[in-house]
Image (tube, grey):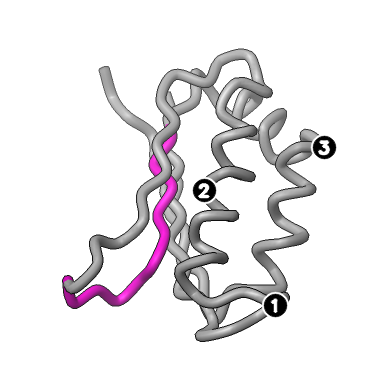
Amino acid sequence: MIRHIVMWKLKEEAEGGTRAQNAQKMRALLENCSNVAPGTHEFQVGIAAPGEESTYDVVLVSTFKDAAALNAYQIHPEHEKAKAFIGKVRETRQCVDYVIEL
């Protein structure tokens, strides 16, 4: 299994929305991707809690059966749609993929 974690720091304002508004839109776009690829086992989108000091604003924690399932997710049209919006509103992005030993 492969764990795929991505974190984004958002711009204060972009695409006509505030950081908080764009975080909510990101969540909705990403959640639309939760079942697009066979072999998706876990898919959670989190937004940093208000009032908490946080380096990043939005996080995706997902687990895929194997590299093929992760790749299918990466190229799916719903994911491409999410990436197009995220690319316009993000300031920075961090990602890590690692193998989970069972």
Instruction: Where is residue 27? Give x, y as percent.
Output: 51, 48
Instruction: Where is residue 73? Give x, y as percent.
Output: 67, 32
Q: Secondary structure at mark 2?
A: helix
Q: Secondary structure at mark 3?
A: helix
- Front-most of 71 and 52? 52
Residue that appears at 43% across and 54% down: 96
> Quick check: can you spot residue 2?
no
Q: CA distance from mark 1 to mark 2?
A: 17 Å
So how many labels did they put on this image?
Answer: 3
The residue tagged 3 is: 77
Q: Which mark is residue 27?
A: 2
In this rendering, which labeled residue sits more in front, label 3 or label 2? 2
> Quick check: can you spot residue 4?
yes
Which sits earlier in the primary sequence, circle 3 or circle 1?
Answer: 1
Residue that appears at 62% across and 74% down: 17
Q: Which mark is residue 71?
A: none
The three-letter code of the residue at mark 2 reads Arg
Q: Is residue 85 left or right of residue 40?
A: right
The three-letter code of the residue at mark 1 reads Gly
Mark 3–mark 2 contact, CB under 8 Å?
Answer: no
Mark 3–mark 1 contact, CB under 8 Å?
Answer: no
View extreme (right): residue: 77
Instruction: Where is residue 84? Give x, y as percent.
Output: 77, 60
Q: CA distance from mark 3 to mark 1?
A: 24 Å
Q: Is residue 80 magenta?
A: no
Magenta range is 52-62
In this rendering, which labeled residue sits more in front, label 1 or label 2? 1
Task: Using the image, determine if residue 31 lies above or below residue 6.
Answer: above
